[in-house]
């Protein structure tokens, strides 16, 4: 089994990892509502409904009030 010859310090490890940054998040536009949202995330429209992939997951209770 491979193992390091000497321990790598926290500082050295963190210096190496400074270049591993997250890219800008991709933003999608819903085809049914036109809302902008992150990919693979549920989002809410202006009526308060929760949507995912253009379909209503949770309907808003504003109609009952």
Image (tube, rainbow, N blue to C red):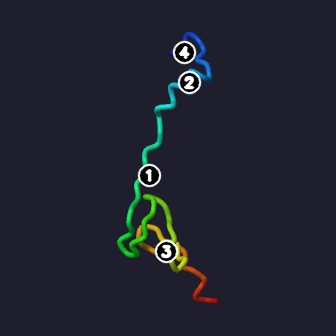
Residue receiving disc 4: 3
Q: Are marks 1 and 3 in contact (CB under 8 Å)?
A: no
Query: Quick check: 32 above or below 42?
Result: below
Residue lying farthest to the right in this orientation: 65
Dot 3 falls on a residue whose secondary structure is loop
Q: Are marks 1 and 2 in contact (CB under 8 Å)?
A: no
Task: State how far apart marks 3 and 4 are (Cα).
Answer: 52 Å
**Number of numbered callouts drawn:** 4
Q: Earlier in the sequence, mark 4 or mark 2?
A: 4
Q: Nearer the viewer, mark 4 or mark 1?
A: 1
Dot 2 falls on a residue whose secondary structure is helix
Residue 6 in the image: x percent, y percent?
A: 58, 11
Task: State how far apart marks 1 and 3 are (Cα).
Answer: 20 Å
Q: Earlier in the sequence, mark 4 or mark 1?
A: 4
Q: Earlier in the sequence, mark 3 or mark 4?
A: 4
Residue 25 - label: 1
How many other residues sit within 10 Å of disc 3, few (<14), some (14-19) or many (≥20)?
Answer: some
Residue 34 in the image: x percent, y percent?
A: 39, 72
Q: Nearer the viewer, mark 3 or mark 4?
A: 3
| 57 or 34, nearer to the observer | 34
Residue receiving disc 2: 13
Q: Are marks 4 and 2 in contact (CB under 8 Å)?
A: no
Residue receiving disc 3: 45
Q: Which residue corresponds to the image point at 55% horizontal and 77% vertical from the top-left?
A: 48
Query: Quick check: 36 above or below 33?
Result: above
Q: Earlier in the sequence, mark 3 or mark 2?
A: 2
Residue 55 - label: none
Q: Which residue corresponds to the image point at 43% horizontal and 58% vertical from the top-left?
A: 39
Q: Which residue corresponds to the image point at 54% horizontal and 14% vertical from the top-left?
A: 4
Residue 50 in the image: x percent, y percent?
A: 52, 72
How many other residues sit within 10 Å of disc 4, few (<14), some (14-19) or many (≥20)?
Answer: few
Dot 1 falls on a residue whose secondary structure is loop
């Amino acid at each position: 089994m491979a193992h390091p010859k000497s321990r790598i310090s926290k500082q050295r490890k963190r210096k190496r990892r400074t270049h591993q940054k997250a890219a800008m998040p991709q933003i999608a536009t819903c085809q049914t509502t036109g809302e902008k949202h992150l990919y693979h995330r549920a989002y809410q429209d202006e009526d308060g409904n929760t949507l995912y992939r253009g379909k209503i997951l949770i309907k808003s209770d504003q109609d009952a009030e």
